[in-house]
Amino acid sequence: MPTPKALNGLKVVSFHALDPEGAKVLGPINRELSAPSAVGGLSAAQLDPESAAVQILNRALTEAQTAGASFRKLGTESVPLTGTRIVKFRQELQKVPVYGSYVSVELDGQNQCLALNAILGNPKNVEPIAKVSPAQAVKSAAKAPGLAVDAAEDAPRLHYYFDAADKAWKLVYIVEDAPVTAKKPSPHLTPAAADFVVDANTGKLIATLPRTSTLEATGMDDLGVARTVTIARRGNKRVLRDDTLRIATYDFGFRDPETQFKRLPGRLITSPFSSSAISAHANASVVSKFLRDTLLRNNIDNEGGVIVSSIQALVREGNPNAATKQWFNAFWNGDQMVYGQVLNEGKLRSLASSLDVVAHEMFHGVTDGTSRLEYVTESGALNESYSDIFGTVIANFANPDIAAWNWEIGERLAASNVPFRDMSDPGRFGQPMLYRQFRRLPASQQPSDANDWGFVHANSGIHNFAAFHVITARDGAGRFLFTAAECAAMFYIALTQHLSRTSQFGDSRRAVLLAAQTLFRAEAPAAREARLAGIEAGFAAAGIP
Ligand SMILES: [Zn+2]
């Protein structure tokens, strides 16, 4: 059925053989073409699909609908889902393609037409001869505001294009897939490449159309595991950018993120990708997917902002291992991730190789944008603990058996493979475990860098121990009370909805209970009570009031 012209200037002519209107058009054509010698002595079933589709097209589309158009074959595709074949065409006028046009003819095994779907343009009264040269078109594209444009691989091609702003068809050049970069730093992710539409009569740039990429690359990460990551193309190079999850990974070239922070994030990484680069990009995508799929959060900032990571950072001042390029640290700087590296088995291993460390640091970004827990004393320890909780949950999330979870953090970084912390046994790395062991500063001392802001990395052990008991809480029959996703939801809602800048451990206990009561409100009271009792018992195990 013909439909009115849409905003893209194209009209649709669409028939299905099972639709009464469509049957009126396609029925007679199918009957005619199935005759034994319908086309040059052959029936449609004896033709190849493309020839059969051309015969159908010529009969189904009237002269008024196509207005002097011709159709260039794009190819034939078998669709296993439907057991049919689809022959595809592009509309052309005097060999110039009509931008956005598309015709598909769906055939059954006998080359009978099931459906015909034609999206057609009618570029009337358009001067068919270009007045500007392809080279001038490239120059116009290079004037796109805010973008530095590199040369595209292919020469620009003429098209008929519907300019929506002018509501008119125009003859244009399309400079296709030209690599671009932002001229100024921008919070938005600049596409790696773009198409530029340039008026072939006036040379004016009509439209800039970003390209997205779903290219993938597989490489070994720093732990020797093969990882597949989404990357993008820039000219003939491959770059570590995932435009779907919005992740970009950079190399800081062993610069100092403290004294040279203005040079962050560094250089967008191009192929061949190092194992550290693969680690950072792959682990960022695991965190992004967890945020999106499990917490329904749109990246760290919940606005789909780009997750930027820089590897190969090296703080020099006060770093005894600077000569060997080791800097055993990673941090969220308020805008992006920065990773150092350590020697392990004689090779530099990025801190980005450790998924729990990556998720820990990125969760500082989530906390930064939500409860904003002050990074001193008890609220600071809570801030640290929430990062450890999500670092551990994310690193173990692929394993549904909570009994088999690994509660250590950073266990494959130091040459000795000794972790920094263990949520199930904080005392193992000198952390307090019970609230009454909370390390307080003497009244004469203010929290500062020198005392780890009031021992935030030590005192976090107490809240970690509580969280470990909550996550592993079991019912009377010995079954876990919570799934991994339920634990993630409870702690996430607590952190982002029920805590403030100065919240204490006891506030976290109340926050998790509030979250659980809402999350499990549809359950039978006995089941819900059992869950709440599991939370209470978990916090009680660490002596948190
Ligand atoms: Zn931290």
Image (cartoon, rainbow, N blue to C red):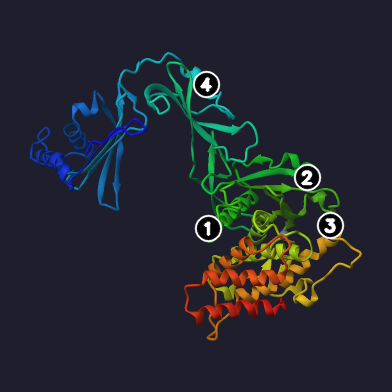
State the residue in front, 354 or 48.
354
3D distance between C-alphas at marks 3 and 2: 19 Å
Classify residue 503 by image quadrant: bottom right
- Work out whether mark 2 precedes mark 1 in sequence or the reverse, and give the earlier one: 2
State the residue in front, 439 or 195.
439
Find residue 157 and report its horizontal and vertical position in percent.
42, 24
- Work out whether mark 4 precedes mark 2 in sequence or the reverse, and give the earlier one: 4
Reading the image, the residue beneath label 2 is: 256
Evaluate if marks 4 and 1 touch, with contact meaning CB atoms under 8 Å apart: no
Q: Is the C-beta of the residue carrying label 2 under 8 Å from the nearest atom of ligand 1?
A: no
Q: Which dot, 2 or 1, sits closer to the camera?
A: 1
Q: Which dot, 4 or 2, sits closer to the camera?
A: 4
What's the mark number on residue 337?
Answer: none
Reading the image, the residue beneath label 1 is: 296
Query: Is residue 279 positioned above or below 401 on the image?
Result: above
> The residue tagged with tag 3: helix, strand or loop?
helix
Q: Amino acid at mark 2?
A: Asp
Classify residue 234 by image quadrant: top right
Q: Amino acid at mark 1?
A: Leu
State the residue in front, 416 or 197.
197
3D distance between C-alphas at marks 2 and 1: 35 Å
Reading the image, the residue beneath label 4 is: 140
> The residue tagged with tag 2: helix, strand or loop?
loop
What's the mark number on residue 449?
Answer: 3
Find residue 161 and report its horizontal and vertical position in percent.
38, 26
> The residue tagged with tag 4: helix, strand or loop?
helix
- Work out whether mark 4 precedes mark 1 in sequence or the reverse, and give the earlier one: 4
